């Protein structure tokens, strides 16, 4: 077939092949991307009736990120001795201020041993529900040139929801790994991952993310 009539821009020799398209798609999903592991502290994980599943899935997500040179950023919640950061106007945290007073905060803020950071990986400490509030997360994201955040953590209705909302308002691209999040209420988790998060984020399981 004579293809001389085709515009140069459509010359088959210069058309992007399927592998090139796949490589571009993969680059878009790894370049300027960071995996956030949020509130996966031993004491918080222990509150779940079945933590084995989420620990395994988040461990897999971390391994995938490291294998693709995607930065892994850990986010933990904690306070100074005496919890001076907790305002009595904050209904959720104020109810637990006395409990926090007797907690070994360094131990409480430690990431679960199954997911612990490697040397050089950043751990960000926050003071409220959202990963951004009271932390230097945004400074770290800017330093790394991050535009796309992949979110994991406990609880779906806590840190994940609050971070999705705030990150979306800050114009970050978002992916939520549904099976790398968990909530004490399974129905709340389902509604958020199936009906709420898709309005502001791509929602998928870790196995699907691995293929991207």
Image (cartoon, rainbow, N blue to C red):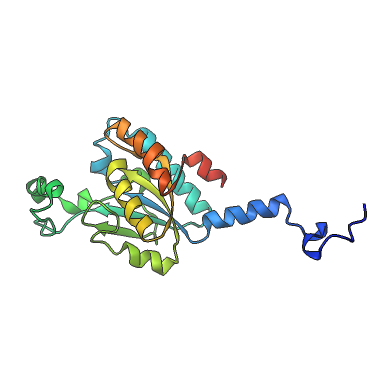
Q: Is residue 91 left or right of residue 142?
A: left
Q: Is residue 139 left or right of residue 26?
A: left
Give the quadrant of residue 158: top left
Q: Is residue 148 left or right of residue 26?
A: left
Q: Residue at x 40, y 68 (%)?
A: 142
Which residue is more in the foreground, 18 or 117? 18
Which residue is more in the foreground, 150 or 61? 150
| Residue 115, percent from left and from top | 37, 46
| Residue 47, percent from left and from top | 24, 36
Which residue is more in the foreground, 83 or 20? 20
| Residue 13, percent from left and from top | 82, 59
Say if 9 sits above or below 193 in the image: below
Q: Residue at x 26, y 43 (%)?
A: 42
Give the quadrant of residue 141: bottom left
Say if 74 sits above or below 43 in the image: below
| Residue 39, percent from left and from top | 29, 48
Give the quadrant of residue 45: top left
Count of marks, rendered view: 0
Q: Is residue 146 left or right of residue 163?
A: right
């Amino acid at each position: 077939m004579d293809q001389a009539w085709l515009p140069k821009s459509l010359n088959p020799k210069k058309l992007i092949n399927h592998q090139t398209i796949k490589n571009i798609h993969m680059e878009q999903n790894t370049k300027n991307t960071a995996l956030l592991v949020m509130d996966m502290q031993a004491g918080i994980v222990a509150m779940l009736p079945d933590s084995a599943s989420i620990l395994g899935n988040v461990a897999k997500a971390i391994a995938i990120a490291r294998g693709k040179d995607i930065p892994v950023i850990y986010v933990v919640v904690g306070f100074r001795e005496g919890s001076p950061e907790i305002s009595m106007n904050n209904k959720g945290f104020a109810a637990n201020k006395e409990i926090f007073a007797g907690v070994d905060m360094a131990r409480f803020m430690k990431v679960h041993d199954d997911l612990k950071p490697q040397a050089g990986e950043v751990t960000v400490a926050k003071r409220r529900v959202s990963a951004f509030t009271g932390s230097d997360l945004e400074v770290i994201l800017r330093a790394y040139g991050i535009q796309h955040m992949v979110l994991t953590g406990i609880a779906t209705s806590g840190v994940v929801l609050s971070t999705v909302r705030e990150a979306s308002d800050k114009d970050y691209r978002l992916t939520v790994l549904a099976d790398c999040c968990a909530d004490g209420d399974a129905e709340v988790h389902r509604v958020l991952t199936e009906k709420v998060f898709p309005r502001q984020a791509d929602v998928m399981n870790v196995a699907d993310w691995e293929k991207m």
